[in-house]
Image: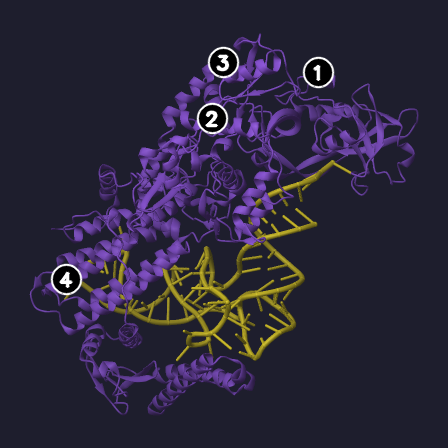
Chain colours: A purple, B yellow
Amino acid sequence: MLLAKHYDPNTTEARWYAHWLEKDYFTSVPDEREAFTIVIPPPNVTGVLHMGHLLNNTVQDILIRHARKSGKNACWVPGTDHASIATEAKVVKRLRERGIKKSDLTREEFLAEAFEWKEEFGGIILIQLQRLGASCDWSRTRFTMEPSLSEAVTKVFVDLFNKGKLYRGLRMTNWDPEAQTVLSNEEVIHTDERRPLYYVRYKVEGSDEYLTIATVRPETIMGDSAVAVHPEDDRYRHLVGKRVHVPLTDRTAPIIADDYVDREFGTGALKITPAHDVNDNEVGKRHDLEVIDILNADGTIAAAAGIFVGVDRERARKLAARQLEADGALVKVEDYGTSVGRSERTGAVVEPRLTLQWFVKMDDFAAKAMAGVERDGNPGGETEFHPPHFFNMFRQWVGPDRVRDWCISRQLWWGHRIPAWFAKGTDGEDAQPFVAPTVGEALVLAKAALGGHLTLADLQQDEDVLDTWFSSWLWPISVFDGFDPANKAELDYYYPTDVVVTAWDIIYLWIARMMMAGEEYTGEMPFKHVYWTGMVRDAQKRKMSKSLGNSPDALALIDAYGADGVRYGMLSAASAGGDIIFDAPIDPKTKQALDESQLCNQGKMFCNKMWNALKLIDMWETNNAPAGAVEGLAIDWIKQKMSLTLKQVEADYASFRLNDALGSLYSFIWGDFCSWFLEMIKPEYQQPISDEVKAAAIEIYSDLVNVLHPFMPFVTEEIWHQLAERDVDLCVAPLPVASSFDESLIARVEAVKDIVSRVREQRSSKGLSPRELLPIATTNPAHAVVTDAGLAEMLQKMANVSEVAFAKTEPAGAVSFVVGTDKFFLTLPETVDLGAERERIEKELAHQRGFVISIEKKLTNERFVSNAPEAVIAVERKKLSDGQARVAALEESLAMC
RNA sequence: GGGUCGUUAGCUCAGUUGGUUUAGAGCGCUGCUUUGACAGAGCAGAGGUCACUGGUUCGAAUCCAGUACGACCCACCA
């Protein structure tokens, strides 16, 4: 068989993925095995794969493949989120491109359009995940708006309403004038922006005095219902109780005193606009002020303002400033830094607005989520965080003083419609909702409340839909149809899930709320572990985002480096929880990855390295001679060291240190296996190798690609099959297990490796060819390389030295070096100039003397000797004697120079 | 204003309860090698007073306090 010169992911990845699917390896049904479950953080149905998904799903796939190969029933449930506002915004945009406004369509027409969009683009991201190698159980793919998940949402809404955990009320809310819906606080992104600060004077009624206030929002003056000053502010005390003329209007408003006002800020006087500011609203309630709503839903000025009616608020601000100036009311304008809230999805500036919405009472829920992760105020509950410090951030969100009620209604069409009906003709805050799964059941409630004469035609459903997260928080239960008692066995088998993998930015939006719903409906936390990934950032540490255009095209990256290369690159950059800087430059024109993506490239080269190791083993002809001493030792050594590595890797899995596990495997395969083991057993050019040695090499290499498989599934599956005829695919082959190992054998071979390195160093520094056979000797007649013929032969082969001899004193023309405490001589050809040798030894000697002195200091310190544990002192004594031996050896060499 | 995380080699980062030969890896860099698995390679090398200042301790990159700088979260912002 002739293998290609280089490994080519393009010819293997698609083939293996198709094969795995065909064999149905990823499908899970409950059986007698232990389950290992992950539910995917559902990407937006219209989304495309980005860097965050790449990282997140690589981690999930590693965990799930590891579980599958460890004999567990691995179940990774994929799916998508309907992403109410994000998707609706996209559909609206697409309609607009065709010249259609949302308001031109009926609700039904719009939804038809949206479903069409979903059908067209909804599956893309899942196909992209397959390119990455994600071993999801595709037969379980769910969508948050499919019928059974929608039923779960309805069921929960009705249940919470009946339990008194929902309420409907008129509250100050965040209004997105572009999408024309309310948003939760978490959907508003605050950024610092420069804004003009206008100083405006209000004339005091019946006086020549003016009261000057400062505002960044002069367009809301028409909604002012008071001017407030601090009660103890002597400048204004005499004005409290009087009235001012509100500029731009013909109204007057009272001057009130309230200690909310900061005397130090601006002029110490503050305009109060209860309809358009959260704090002003509070002040207004305290003083029973009129609420004058001067903003329309689309952000234009409402008729109640009496001026600038129909003008957008941003433009009205400028018009108001101009008018105030013309009226002589504008005192001055300052440049001012203030924080502006924008809609996460539409980017529109969010307006505080009083609207009628549905809310979930959160205090009980928050306590439940908190209880899931803490014990006596410390981390440690049913759910464990990795890394644990996210506990503090979690508490900041969910802690008792922090949490606020959750606004769950949205004035959108794409989403789960609220299962509440009202009697026609009733409206506003006082209208009585009849909450039930169907209109028929709502009618029964309505009849009982309002009289038997009612018919279906007398009811109208709430127009709003629910916040996307109101379905997401049920995800770990609803993907198993767990709200239907008929599926209890399935739920019991897979739930609680083992781990959820997510970035920390949705800690409250999603993770905390899943914990709340989990506890409420199953009595258990929905997952045992949370693996927090960091955010993926670019070289300038900016969050990767579509709007910045700094995110490489994920598929182009996979095309360029192979899925294995990208998986390697993502993971080796990602220690759990830390943000990762992923510097994968892309060509701005073609959006193709440039070849300088160091980490992915390293992954790609790793694949190639493994491919070449395969080629080497594959090309060896065999004979039936028994293994020689060197090969026997090499095989024992690599097997034992592999056991050590396997143990380490399993420990890394257990503590979710996946990048450490990958790092260990990388250096074991590249270093120990390729650079050392294969060289140790490699036959002379075009000579055959013992068949038992080749078989051992194949066995060992098979174990290695086996352990590596969860990280780099494609290249390992390919090599697995190229190495030998198999009756099982690597994807489902059991992982090798660590056996006991002999540390002393490992140590003896490591000592030989050290000597080899020192010989190579000598050759390198003296400009000698590796081919030149050199005599070597040691002053230690008991050294293993003298007494053990196998080790001696290994040293000869690896360092290209002649027979290892015992020498009492330094031979002429030799250089010396110390390994451990043993001195070695390497006799060089006469042509080599030893002039620099003295300098080298002096440098080394100075270093060793310094070392010895530092240990001596320690050991002569009475308090150290009396306080430190025996074991530590013993180690120090050993360090001292070893150091002294090295100093003596070096001094002797120096004398010879 | 409250909080979290970080500061270790040119870059990106490990360093797990304080003690393992006076700090490690990958990449980059430098030198040498090179028809024999792999130049997408091999071998070797240079490069760090572990941000700063105090403290605890026989012993601190590691624990404590403070300072500086950086990233981020929450709240407020007339």
- Asked if marks 4 and 2 touch (Cβ < 8 Å), the reply is no
User: Which residue is tagged 1?
Assistant: A303
Please state which of the two labelled residues, at mark 4 or mark 1, is closer to the viewer: 4
Residue A101 visible in image? no
Q: Secondary structure at mark 3?
A: loop
User: What amino acid type should be assigned to the residue bearing mark 3?
Assistant: Thr
Q: CA distance from mark 4 to mark 1?
A: 89 Å
Would residue A465 be found to the left or right of residue A490 on screen? right
Q: CA distance from mark 4 to mark 3?
A: 73 Å
Marks 3/1 same chain: yes
User: Which residue is tagged 4?
Assistant: A694
In what quadrant of the picture does the C terminus of chain A appear? bottom left
First in residue order: circle 4 vs circle 1:
1
| Residue A655: quarter of image | bottom left
Q: CA distance from mark 4 to mark 2?
A: 59 Å
- Asked if marks 2 and 3 touch (Cβ < 8 Å), the reply is no
Say few, some or many: other residues with alpha carbon within 10 Å of mark 1 (under 14 / 14 to 19 / 20 or more). Answer: some
Chain containing the residue with disc 2:
A
User: Which residue is tagged 2?
Assistant: A90
Q: Secondary structure at mark 1?
A: helix
